[in-house]
Amino acid sequence: MGDERVLNLGWTEWDTREAVEANRAAFLHALGGGRMWLVTLKQCHGDVMHVVNSPTAHELRGDALATRTPGLLLAVQTADCVPILLADTRHRAVAAVHAGWRGTLARIAEKMLGRMRMEFDTRAEDVFASLGPAIGACCYEVGPEVAQAFAAQFAEARNWFEGPFDRLASGDDPAPFPWLSMTPPGHAAPAPRVRLDLRAANRSQLEVAGVPATQITASALCTACRTDLLFSHRRERGRTGRMMAVIGIRA
Ligand SMILES: [Zn+2]
């Protein structure tokens, strides 16, 4: 990142509190949400969810929020992970979910639909879902441990990976290149990797849970390809900002 002003909405060590507060105020103003109470999370790549009914003074720890209370603006912050916004238009309930590979593996989107059913009587067929910009299958390389974890958890996992998924997922790949010993030092082939499509995985989770495909929209933007527009934790090696996806019910 250069010296130009960027719309960083998260607390990061390189940005000042004043700048982030000013950016958040400008963001809320642009949305027409200036009078709404912004609810943010201390995100931890887990599957902890919170139902909030009133403004909270402190940040809750977790990765998903839901409410039926007007005036609250639920936020998740991302810089590669998938922000997922859910709206049950029948019962007027909303949710915001943060799904990286760990949250996706833990089925956080699906669990949120279950929680909304419990709390608000939400039926998946009444839910509209929106998946925001995230790192794409073009750029999101992961190792065999991630492929194996997904293969163990989802029958359809191979649909979300590009590259030698079956070989990596099976785990019985002790010597993929028998000729390796013949390569000169320093020229060893890198360990095989696959690329994960986090949006496809979450879209599938929502559809399997009953959200109609026609009610799911997803941004096609890859955060790592488009660092001119977006923040990417991976591409920018951790020194990046945070985007914010918000949803709420107007008071
Ligand atoms: Zn990309």
Image (tube, helix red, strand yellow):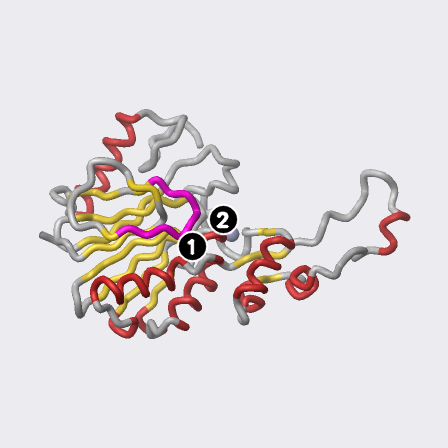
Element under disc 2: loop
The residue positioned 28% from the left and 38% from the top of the image is 59
> Does the image show residue 59?
yes
Which residue position holds label 2?
225
The residue positioned 23% from the left and 58% from the top of the image is 94
Label 2 amino acid?
Cys
| Left or right of 72 on screen, residue 11 | right
Assign the magenta stretch its main secondary structure. loop
The residue positioned 38% from the left and 67% from the top of the image is 206
Task: Identify the disc placed on residue 210.
Answer: none
Q: Nearer the viewer, residue 222 or 197?
A: 197
Q: Nearer the viewer, residue 150 or 186?
A: 150
Question: Against 29, is 159 above or below?
Answer: below
Which residue position holds label 1?
221
Label 1 amino acid?
Leu
Question: Against 239, is 115 above or below?
Answer: below
What residue range appears in magenta? 42-50
Question: Against 210, is 81 above or below?
Answer: above
Q: Is mark 2 within 8 Å of ligand 1?
A: yes
- Residue 139: x %, y % from top left: 55, 51
Q: Are marks 2 and 1 in contact (CB under 8 Å)?
A: yes
Element under disc 1: loop
